[in-house]
Image (cartoon, helix red, strand yellow):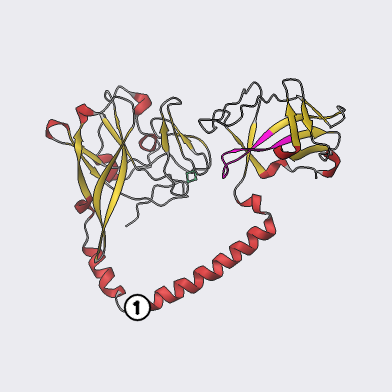
Amino acid sequence: MPQEIVFRMGVPIVNASGQEVGSLEKLIFLETEKKITEIVVRDLSGLKRVPLTQVVDITPHSIRLTPSGSLADFPVFDISHFEEVPLWFYPPDFRIEVGSLMTLKPQDIRLLGESEALSRRDFMARSTALVATMIGISLVVPIGGYVLAAAKTKLSEHWVTLPVTLDKLPVDEPVAHTFNAVSVSGWMRVPVVRTVWLIRHTGSSDPASEPEDLKLNLDSSLEKKYSSPFLTVFSPVCPHLGCSPQWFADQKLFICPCHHSIYKLNGERIGGPAPRPMDTLPVRLGKGGSIHVLYEEFQVGVPQKIRLA
Ligand code: FES
């Protein structure tokens, strides 16, 4: 079990000789390590990031630094490189007494430093261009056949009948359902395992469950035509950059682990960088409550719901 530590904002920070040198301002939670790695201390010159390794003792009344932990040695901290994390978003086995505490996490690319990030981007751009050129050359011959075959593939071929019926689903409680499928892309047929989120409702009198993208008129005529007041089917793909939001039953929220986009039961985005709600998929209910889903993929990172071919 990890050590349980109580943090309170404003607790005095003392040096090795017991002299008060600042106060606790915030915590830094490093997502990649799934733990708090630094504290943010306010002293007369501003905010300082202090690694937890420089802390020897934490009591409800003070946090003591190591003899080598002189605040003057730490550079002033630019807080704009960090973003707030909801108070409850901690690993399940790490308990923190929150009070008025706020927690920060580094924003992805800025953590690298601008120059390193730029040089990485430059390297990635050149590598991508080179690889794209090579792939382009190797595809010159088959590409014509691919385009012709792709044009013949009908979207209606992608309807899937799920091995579950409506009455077996809990009401207003998302259930992830996985099924085997064949990804058809032109002349290629690749077996894949896919997941959809199924949410059963009591009916159209249930406004909280009306899918947000329907309300915002993001759905195409296909998604509008094949929808049901009794069942919403969400794509498992986060509209931000394509990760997989998970349902947290205790919070009654979908949360994406990658950049913390947060969605309500109806897919409405209430936090994070995602540019639109969760994407609904077309659904038909058949005899005996059988469930037929049309699996679609949409462009990520844009506010519109643009179906990929
Ligand atoms: S991919 Fe989901 S929040 Fe970024």
- Residue linked to disc 1: 140
Apparent side of residue 106 relative to residue 156 in the rendered image (left or right): right
Residue at 21% x, 30% y is 166
Residue 23, percent from left and from top: 78, 28
Could you say where residue 36 lies in the image, as x and y percent from the top left? Answer: 63, 36
Q: Is residue 248 above or below residue 125?
A: above
Q: Residue at x 44, y 50 (%)?
A: 300
Residue 168: give x, y in percent of width and height. Answer: 21, 28
| Quadrant where the image shows the N terminus | top right
In depth, the one of 298 and 32 nearer the eye is 32
Category of crowding for the residue at label 1, using alpha-carbon neighbours closer than 10 angstroms: few (below 14), some (14–19), many (at least 20) = few
Q: Main secondary structure of the magenta part?
A: strand
The residue sitting at 43% across, 40% down in the picture is: 245
- Residue nearer the viewer, 100 or 32: 32
Residue name at image x 43 percent, y 76 percent = 134
Residue 34 on the magenta segment? yes
Q: Which residues are magenta?
A: 27-40
Membership of 1 in magenta stretch: no
For this view, does 83 lie left or right of residue 136? right
Amino acid type, callout 1: Val
